[in-house]
Amino acid sequence: MRIIRRVAAAIAIAVVAIAPLRAQVSFERILRAAQEPQNWLTYSGTLFGHRYTALTQITPANVKNLELQWVFQTRGPAEATEKSEATPLVVDGVMYTVLSPNHVVALDAATGRMFWMYSPRLSQLSRVCCGRINRGLAILGDALFMGTIDGHLIAIDAKTGKPLWDTTISKPELGYSFTMAPLVVKDKVIMGPAGGEYGIRGFIAAYDAKTGKEVWRFNTVPGPGEPGHETWTDDKGAWQHGGGSIWVTGSYDPDANLMYWGVGNPGPDWNADPRPGDNLYTDSVVALEPDSGKLRWHYQFTPHDEFDYDSTQIPILADLEWKGRPRKVMLWANRNGFVYVLDRVTGEFLLGKAFVKQNWNLGFDNGRPVRDPKAKPTPEGTRIEPGTQGGTNWYSPSFSPRTGLFYVSAWDNYSAISRYAEVAPWEDGKKYTGRAPAGPGGGAAGRMPVTYRTEEEGYGAVRAIDPKTGDKKWDFKMVDYTESGVLTTASDLLFSGGREGHFFALDARTGELLWKTNLGGTVASGPITFAVDGKQYVAVAGEGALYVFGLPD
């Protein structure tokens, strides 16, 4: 690793004269990102989270001619990570991305030639639940920002790959890790930690982009005296290890001056007995003022969650005609199996409708889900739909203003067995899930989900939903489940992938398959598109490599 770091440092020094970043990325550019479709300036393409582009060179008529243009290995030095979940940024012909877990590279977006690599020294004390991965970067000015799996936020010079500052945010040995792509709003870098399975207490915090100093912090599990603390009704301090992690990037509405963030599951996740009450703000969306971190409103999708229904999905901000008048709304396909429409200014509940098979919710009472009394853990086990991976998960959805459709990576006909078990006390650095020890037959006894699936049931799909009604418009079904994000274009194309290893293009209006290729492993990232010198490209991270496609010259 010393040799690798020295080589990376030498590369960084050697390319200072190249200065690949041609123009600074002001926040005004990020606000107007939709007007720069040749670039991809933030995690979801724009601050509204659409993953939609105005580029039209690749069309339903010619997409069958797509060819591989270049490939770049995304497995970091000395890492054995099986998949990449990172979304690259593209700025004026330069691509920036993360190799697992935290190696940042700058590439020529047209050829894949590497300008520099930055590899931070990571603590060996880090505790991660679900893989040594990173979902991407943010940029402001000429600085890139990355959270690390050992609890740091690092600013990196985009021209040279040299670190500008390094802020220690939390202790990695306690399970705090940063896997999300940060969000830049004005002069602040916003992010929060993963680690709910280790009994962390989650938060969303803002850091000064020039210095790395913390400006404000919003606790996603409120303490005594904070609004929402009354929803933790035990007398043993369950809130101190209440989960509420943040591991997917939020969205921002400049007109309302509000950020929207999804919050993860409460802890312990598999046994709710130690934490009676609704357990705010877990499994919720929170609307925060970016200047102060003040909570404007919240909506809780799954109060008192017992099924690991993290609400860490991407908030989609759209302006729709709603019941005869214009409405600023938020679209949300939730892990609990329901698609929601909320007023993004006030938080008013407008629609909640199941988009996959579910058996836990009987309906809504003034926006609050009505729990089916039969849907609860039992000693012998209760079948719960959707299963603990949810009707969807963190995979980025898309919204096309042209088609008016909301596109979601879905898991349908998927369930789990929910069993009751005792929960062990919280301990530093140990998982705090409420799972019981392994039982006979290699399964897990007690309160733990077990996949319930035969060859005939359960499938993944790209699902198109009418956000005005919640109705399904079409499905593109897959044999296996999907972990891929979705991208749509102004030429009415949709790009996505899945566990089968395919990367494919669909007609965004009908779901018809127009093109596909096999990348040889799971696609678990969000595709992007960009243009260099007038040529449009499509990029996606697969298993161990980043693939870039384009039409033949």
Image (cartoon, helix red, strand yellow):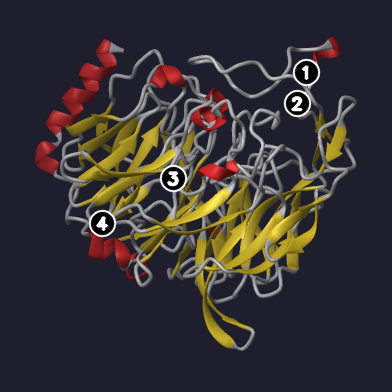
Left or right placement of residue 119 versus residue 52 in this view:
left
Q: Nearer the viewer, mark 3 or mark 2?
A: 3
| Labelled disc at residue 149 | none
Instruction: From the image, tell me which residue sits under label 1.
Output: 444
* Amino acid under disc 4: Asp
Instruction: From the image, tell me which residue sits under label 4.
Output: 92
Mark 4 and mark 2 lie on one chain; the one further toward the N terminus is 4
Instruction: From the image, tell me which residue sits under label 3.
Output: 226
Q: Secondary structure at mark 4?
A: loop
Q: Secondary structure at mark 2?
A: loop
- Residue at mark 4 to residue at mark 3: CA–CA distance: 44 Å
> 198 or 293, which is in the foreground?
293
Quarter of image, res 121 = top left
User: Residue placed at 41% from the left, 51% from the top?
Assistant: 43
List the single residue furthest toward the bottom: 324
User: Residue placed at 77% from the left, 55% from the top?
Assistant: 370
- Residue at mark 4 to residue at mark 2: CA–CA distance: 48 Å
Q: What percent of the width, then of the height, locates residue 153?
A: 29, 34
Instruction: From the image, tell me which residue sits under label 2.
Output: 448
* Amino acid under disc 1: Ala
> 279 or 11, which is in the foreground?
279
